[in-house]
Image (cartoon, rainbow, N blue to C red):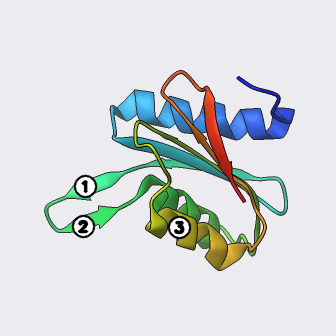
Amino acid sequence: MSDLDPEDEKIVILARSARARTQAAEGAAVRDTDGRTYAAVTIDLPSFQITAMQAAIAAAVSSGAEGLEAAALVTSEPFVVGASVQAVRDLSGTAPIIRADAKGEVQEVVR
């Protein structure tokens, strides 16, 4: 990994593990303002599609999270899609979104 804070490294690892476990297109993890973490993967069913980030945020919100400190997305895509960015921004205008590749190497941080 890069020079990430240990707590940010943790959410990258969680996102990477979720993606690897299910062989999903993307894995995501978020840390709420209480320090709790939530991980999820892309859901692509015939009747229901949601990005990994949206799924992680849904898990956080359904558990009572009111804000986010940081988010991580593990993907092979060259950028974070708008729906994922907007989902993070719905809970935090300032939380960094860390995009990493399958090896966990940080490719960018969206602020």
CA separation in Å, label 1 and label 2: 6 Å
- In the image, taking residue 62 as reference, residue 19 lies left or right, namely left
Q: Residue 49: where, in percent of width, then height?
A: 28, 64
Residue 34 position by quadrant:
bottom right
Q: According to the image, label 1 marks what residue?
A: 44
Secondary structure beneath dot 1 equals: strand
Q: Residue 74: where, in percent of width, then height?
A: 51, 39
Q: Residue furthest left?
A: 46
| Marked residue nearer the N-terminal end (2 or 3) | 2
Q: Residue at x 45, y 60 (%)?
A: 81
Secondary structure beneath dot 3 equals: helix
| Marked residue nearer the N-terminal end (3 or 1) | 1
Q: Residue 3: where, in percent of width, then height?
A: 82, 28
Work out which quarter of the rendered image holds the C terminus and state it: bottom right
Residue 36 numbered tag: none
Q: According to the image, label 2 marks what residue?
A: 48
Q: Residue at x 63, y 78 (%)?
A: 90
CA separation in Å, label 2 and label 3: 14 Å
Q: Residues within 10 Å of mark 1 (few under 14, many from 20)?
A: few
Q: Residue at x 20, y 57 (%)?
A: 45
The amino acid marked with disc number 1 is: Asp
The amino acid marked with disc number 3 is: Ala
